[in-house]
């Protein structure tokens, strides 16, 4: 999808912490949100379409601490890239052979 010549119009309808009634997947890290877990649910309207943007409290906090927001939202790829960058910054490029989940945990404990 080409975004040139088009301005994305996004309105946030609501953004709140809710308890997961079923299993979801985090829109940032791609890892599951378990039943009963608190997560952030943001309801946005993008170009007239309603989207639910679900993410772990943890992932949301990371974005918050790193001031990682952009007007048209953060994609899962952007987030993964951010975590990998933060991780290699923290480890000075060593030890890159760990899972994304471990990287996420390390970054989380560094920024929070
Ligand atoms: Zn997440």
Image: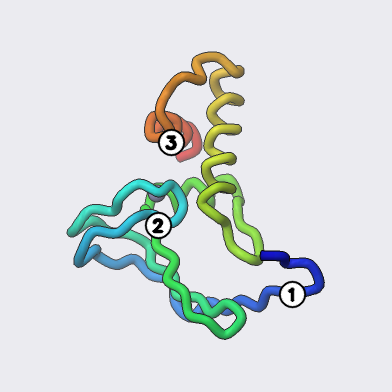
Residue at (45% x, 75% y) in the render: 43
Q: Quadrant of the N terminus?
A: bottom right
Q: Residues under labels 2 and 1: Cα distance?
A: 25 Å
Residue at (73% x, 67% y) in the render: 3
User: Regarding mark 3 in the picture, which secondary structure is present there?
Assistant: helix
Where 93 sits versus 15, above or below? above
Is 59 on the left-hand or right-hand side of 22? Answer: right
User: Regarding mark 1 in the picture, which secondary structure is present there?
Assistant: loop
Q: Residue furthest top?
A: 94
Is 96 on the left-hand or right-hand side of 1? Answer: left
Assess disc 2: are there few (<14), some (14-19) or many (≥20) residues with their C-alpha within 10 Å of its C-alpha.
Answer: many
Residue 63 position within the rendered picture, expressed as x and y whole percent measured from the top left: 53, 50
Assess disc 3: are there few (<14), some (14-19) or many (≥20) residues with their C-alpha within 10 Å of its C-alpha.
Answer: many
Residue 6 position within the rendered picture, expressed as x and y whole percent measured from the top left: 76, 74
- Disc 3: which residue: 104
Q: Residues under labels 3 and 1: Cα distance?
A: 32 Å
Residue at (57% x, 85% y) in the render: 48
Q: Residues under labels 3 and 2: Cα distance?
A: 13 Å
- Disc 2: which residue: 55
Residue 16 position within the rendered picture, expressed as x and y whole percent measured from the top left: 38, 70
Where 97 sits versus 72, above or below? above
Answer whether labels 3 and 2 touch (C-beta < 8 Å). Answer: no
Assess disc 1: are there few (<14), some (14-19) or many (≥20) residues with their C-alpha within 10 Å of its C-alpha.
Answer: few
- Of 58 and 76, nearer the camera is 76
Ligand 1 within 8 A of label 3's CB? yes
Q: Quadrant of the C terminus?
A: top left
């Amino acid at each position: 999808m080409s975004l040139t010549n088009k301005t994305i119009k996004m309105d946030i309808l609501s953004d709140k912490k809710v308890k997961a009634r079923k299993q979801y997947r985090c829109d940032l890290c791609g890892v599951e949100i378990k039943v009963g877990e608190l997560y952030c649910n943001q309801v946005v309207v993008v170009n007239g379409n309603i989207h639910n943007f679900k993410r772990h409290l943890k992932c949301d906090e990371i974005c918050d601490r790193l001031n990682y927001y952009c007007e048209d939202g953060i994609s899962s790829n952007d987030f993964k890239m951010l975590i990998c960058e933060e991780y290699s910054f923290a480890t000075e490029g060593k030890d890159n052979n760990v899972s994304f989940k471990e990287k996420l945990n390390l970054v989380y404990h560094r920024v929070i």
